[in-house]
Image: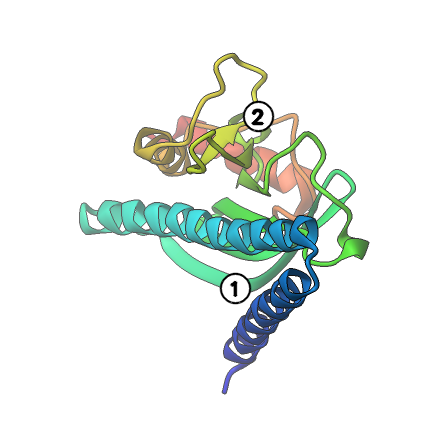
Amino acid sequence: MSDSESAKQKVDELDETWAAALAEAEAQARAAGRVDISEYLALRKSNDLLRKTACDWLLATFQNVAGEMNRAGASLQISNDDNYHFTVGSAGLVGKLLKLENGIRQLLVEVGWPRVPADGFIRGGGIALGRLRHVGIKSASELIRLVTSPEGTPRWIVENNHEPAEEIRDANIRQHIAILLDSSRVDEIHFSSECTPGGRGTLLAIAAAARRSP
């Protein structure tokens, strides 16, 4: 078994153990007459299912559109990490990563939520967070938040302070992949060490060459 398969198996086992523990605690609370606790635990279990469903939908949709672009002639490289850790603000998030690469350009689709008390909590509401991160193009990157409608339907919204909040749909996903495929898009003022070991000067030279190319 490869390291990635082993890591995924451990995450799956953790999720199964967590779901079983919630179900047992909920049953015990109901048996003890603690309806308030049992309702809270039932909500936790329901939210975990909503998180998994919504995260899987987002990643699958990005991957499907990337595959569609490849069949049309693009050469996007696609990779996954099912045991991915990242931070947003003070919250530690555990979830999944989808990486799409077009040459040196990268689009990272990160989704996750806190799993244990030490991870902190999601400020501002919501049951999960994500980032649509264009490495080297900060202006095109977006922070997204998973919320539920009054009817209990999960939806990803963009953190752009617009009212009403913009919901992530197929068109948004296609726009992000179009940016990844557009070699003219680059932010010269935002380069970090994660982009390339050559540093900022190398990236500026690459960006200038990309703009000159037809």
Give the residue displayed 52% in from the left and 64% down from the top.
82
Q: Please, what is the three-letter code of the amino acid marked with disc 2? A: Glu
In the rendered image, residue 170, in percent from the top left (x then y), is placed at: 31, 34
Q: Which of the pair 131/71 is nearer the observer?
A: 131
Give the residue displayed 37% in from the left and 36% down from the top.
173
In the rendered image, residue 189, in percent from the top left (x then y), is placed at: 65, 25
Identify the image quadrant of the C terminus: top left
Q: Is residue 184 above or below residue 194?
A: above
Of the numbered discs 2 and 1, the one sitting upstream in the chain is 1
Q: Extreme right residue here? A: 118
Whole-number angstrom distance, CA of label 2 to CA of label 1: 24 Å
Q: Residues within 10 Å of mark 1 (few under 14, many from 20)?
A: some
Label for residue 159? 2
Give the residue displayed 70% in from the left and 55% down from the top.
34
Q: Which residue is mark 1?
A: 82
Q: Please, what is the three-letter code of the amino acid marked with disc 1? A: Asp
Give the residue displayed 21% in from the left and 47% down from the top.
73
Q: Which of the pair 141/51 is nearer the observer?
A: 51
Q: Element under label 1?
A: strand
Q: Which of the pair 212/181 is nearer the observer?
A: 181
Q: Is residue 74 left or right of residue 110?
A: left
Camera sees residue 74: no
In the rendered image, residue 60, in percent from the top left (x then y), is placed at: 35, 52
Q: Element under label 2?
A: loop
Q: Extreme bottom residue here? A: 1
Label for residue 50? none
To which quarter of the image does residue 199 belong?
A: top right
To which quarter of the image does residue 121 belong?
A: top right
In the rendered image, residue 3, in percent from the top left (x then y), is placed at: 56, 79
